[in-house]
Image (spheres, rainbow, N blue to C red):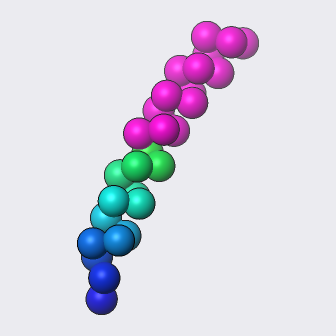
């Protein structure tokens, strides 16, 4: 049960994903 290592990993990907979507919309 190590929610610490999993917590930082989950919140990090979503943040980058949001930027990726905005980047794609700007590039497309």
Q: Position of residue 15 (x, y in %)?
A: 41, 39
Image quadrant containing the N terminus: bottom left
The relative height of residue 18 versus residue 28 in the rendered view (above or below) is below
Q: Quadrant of residue 2?
A: bottom left
The residue positioned 41% from the left and 60% from the top of the image is 9
**Count of numbered badges drawn on the protein:** 0
Q: Is residue 21 above or below residue 5?
A: above
Q: Residue at x 40, y 58 (%)?
A: 10
Q: Residue, x 47% and y 49% (percent of image)? A: 13
In the displayed structure, 14 sits above or below 25; it is below
Q: Is residue 10 left or right of residue 16?
A: left
Residue at the extreme right: 28
Q: Determine the residue positioned at 53% across, 21% down.
A: 22
From the image, give the main secondary structure of the stretch colored magenta: helix
Q: Is residue 24 left or right of residue 7?
A: right
Q: Is residue 23 covered in magenta?
A: yes
Q: Magenta segment, which residues?
A: 15-28
Q: Position of residue 20 (x, y in %)?
A: 57, 30
Q: Where is residue 28 drawn, in percent x and y? A: 72, 12
Q: Is residue 23 left or right of residue 8?
A: right
- Residue 14: x, y in percent? 43, 45
Asked if residue 22 lies left or right of residue 1, the reply is right
The correct choice, above or below, for 7 with respect to 25 in the image is: below
In the image, residue 3 lies in the stretch drawn in magenta: no
């Amino acid at each position: 049960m190590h929610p610490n290592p999993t917590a930082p990993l989950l919140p990090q990907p979503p943040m980058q994903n949001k930027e990726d979507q905005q980047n794609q919309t700007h590039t497309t």
